[in-house]
Each structure stands twice: as structure tokens, then as C-alpha cells.
Amino acid sequence: MSSAIQRKSWISPEEYLRNELTSEVRHEYCAGEVYPVHGEIEAMAGASVEHNRIAGNIFSELHAQLRRKPSEAFMNDMKTHVAKRGDEWFYYPDVMVNCDPAGQQKYYCDTPAVIVEVPSPHTERRDKLEKRLAYELIDSLHTYVLVAQERRELTVYRRDREGWQREILPEEGELLRIPQLEFSITLDAIYARTGR
């Protein structure tokens, strides 16, 4: 599919999903508008080695630790779907965990429990603001993790009874814990082979 899809003023969620099946570049859908996943430049070039290593390290640990549990991890080609107040969004998280089979569709998930994004300098602002606010509308989501590529730092947003709380994990040897999944991973394992 050409970049012509981006120039339309509005398309339906159904049209977006149909177009995405044949697109050479992945797009995200934001209330009727469509954008390349990593922005104009990165959409064609792809993600960096560091991005792939970090996302792969997290996915492989989740996959291994969840193997005998009802939750399932997905990596960057499975969309998450947000529907609230008459609007819809579809994003491609770098890593996502779904614990509700009823919310798992063939090409997207309505019920993610955990979402991990590994922002680049070009996508960091969007991941911290737009995507975070959209993800917080998902009732099933309890953990949103932003993993920096350029420095050794995780920003973890957790939902509790009072709302969303933010936590920064910068310490060597520190663990990212997701108690709801009985999952943990060290920052050393997350940043393995990245030099961070």
C-alpha cells in the first residue's frame, strides 16, 4: 500500500484493518487518522539494533515465564485496540501481554494487561503522552512500561486503586516486577548486548 492512506482525512476502523493486511509499512490508527508506526523516517528504515535487542529480551523472558500460565506475550506485529467515548485507536506495542482469551482477536487485542514500548528519540514524546493516555483508557491494562534505548532507564506506570502511579527504575541489578503475572526481569537482562 502506498503512503496515500495517510493523506485521507478520515477512514473507518474497518477500512484501516483491511488496508493494514496488505500494507508494506505498518500504520497506527488514531480516531480516524492513520500514521506510520515509527514516523515517516523510521517507518521505511525500521527499528534500530538496540530497539530489537531490548524488545526481544523482554519478549523472550515473558514468553518463557508465561509458557505454563493463561497469559500470552506478543511482539510488535500484534495491534492493541482502544475503544472509548465513540473513538477508536489501534497501536502496535513493542511487547504486549494478554490474559483474557475472549479479548484476543486475530490481528489485535482488546484486553492487554501489560504493554511495553521501547521509544526511539523520534517516538519518545508520542509514547509518553498520546499512547500513554490512550492505553490508560483500557480497563484490562494494569502496567505500561517505557524502556529507554539511549540510556539505562525504565519508566513504569502501574494502575492501583487511586489511579496510575509512575516509577523510575535506573539502578543496576534492579528488577522490573509485574506481580499480577508473577514475572520479574533484571535491567541487566533487559539491556543485554546493548552496552547499556
Image (cartoon, rainbow, N blue to C red):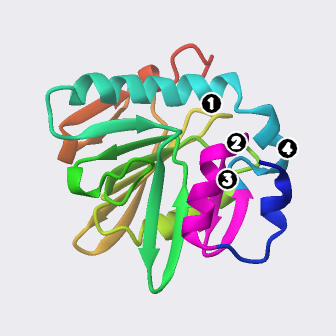
Q: Nearer the viewer, mark 3 or mark 4?
A: 3
Q: Relative to 12, say whether 69 is above or below.
A: above
Residue at the spot of label 4: 41
Q: Residue furthest bottom?
A: 85
User: Which amino acid, mark 3?
Assistant: His
Label 4 or label 2, whichever comes before in sequence order: 4
Q: Which secondary structure, mark 3?
A: strand
Sequence-earlier tag: 1 or 2: 1
Does the rendering let one see residue 71? Answer: yes
Find out whether the residues at labels 1 and 2 contact each other: C-beta distance under 8 Å: yes
User: 194 and 117: which one is in front?
Assistant: 117
For the point 15% across and 34% down, the residue is 69
Q: From what the image shows, is residue 57 above or below residue 35?
A: above
Residue type, label 4: Ile
User: Which residue matches tag 3?
Assistant: 27
- Measured as percent of width and height from the top left, residue 89 is found at 54, 67
Q: Which residue is mark 2?
A: 120
